[in-house]
Image: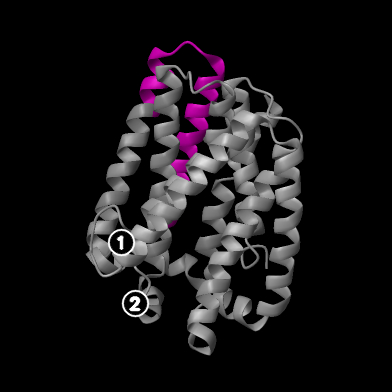
Amino acid sequence: MLNILSIDVVIGAVAGEVMAVRLLHVNPGFALWIILPLSVWIIYTTDHLIDGFRLKNSSHTVRHFFHYYYSKQTGILIILLSVVNIVLIALYLKRPVFYFGIYAGFITVVYLIIVYFSKNIKSFLLQKEFFVAVIYSAGIWGGPAALMSYKINTPLILLIAGFFFIVWAAVLILSVYEVNYDKLDKHNTFAVNFGVEKTVSLIYFLMAAAFIICSGEIVFITNSEIDIASKILMIMGLLLLIILNFPAQLRQNNVYRTLIELVFWLPGLFLFF
């Protein structure tokens, strides 16, 4: 149920924000810790609700069928939480983060329009996985970066890039597992458009890039926090590769999806350092 309601995704986003705030040494204020999980839940749930309405009873995933069946209740909850979120953003969110949210929201809308009108084009970057990775990573790192006026040193930029590569790879792993469902439901994913083999190759390429970045940070950067973050990212990457390579065992009861989301709870370990 946590996965169906995207609660595990919300926890993962908050865990990622914990790491981002610690590494960038900023104080985003109490409001962000309410706004971020609300925003993530609203975005993910709205996406599932739209897919549920589009597919109706023909949906091939429990998640989309659930959101269609409980569409009225879910829609009301989205509206109520959106109102609460807007009030919190307007009254309490720090201005640099507020302005970043406006810019990010505008770019998101433009990108969605491009993707919508290009849905039959098999472009490398116009796939759902890339878009989700960009929005997820920007949502976690953008606010803290805005509080620093985007003055981030090279090691942190590289670490953020490594984080983004891992997020992208994780979403691609989901599309590999769900490629048959996505074909039936006509989702425009990388695995559907380019095939599982090419998708797996891209996953390994992204993981290799992330591991190279993290290894370099551990060897050449004398900063304990970056060292810890790099090791956490490498563990996340290793766990995701394990998940990728055991489809027969992890497809049962959609265990793979739960495990992938749990991997993104690991940055929350920064609470203990």
Span highlighted in magenta in the image: 214-243
Residue at the location (54% across, 24% down)? 228
Q: Is residue 187 visible?
A: yes
Q: How many marks?
A: 2
Q: Is residue 241 visible?
A: no
Assign the C terminus to one quadrant of the image.
top right
158 vs 266: above or below:
above
Name the image colouring. one colour
CA distance separating discs 2 and 1:
11 Å
Splitting the image into 4 quarters, where does residue 44 fall? bottom right
Residue at the location (62% across, 28% down)? 21
Identify the residue under disc 1: 190
Magenta span: predominant SS is helix
Residue at the location (37% across, 81% down)? 184
Q: Seen in the image, is 86 located left or right of residue 53? A: right
Of residues 217 and 152, the one nearer the viewer is: 152
Q: Seen in the image, is 200 located left or right of residue 256? A: left
- Residue 230 is covered by the magenta coloring: yes
Q: Amino acid at mark 2?
A: Lys
Extreme residue in the top direction: 222
Q: Which mark is residue 183?
A: 2
Q: Residues within 10 Å of mark 2 (few under 14, many from 20)?
A: some
Secondary structure at badge 2 equals helix
The location of residue 193, given as percent across then percent down, is 26, 67
Q: Seen in the image, is 33 located left or right of residue 151? A: right
Q: Amino acid at mark 1?
A: Phe
128 vs 272: above or below:
below
Of residues 113 and 194, the one nearer the viewer is: 113
Secondary structure at badge 1 equals helix
80 vs 234: above or below:
below
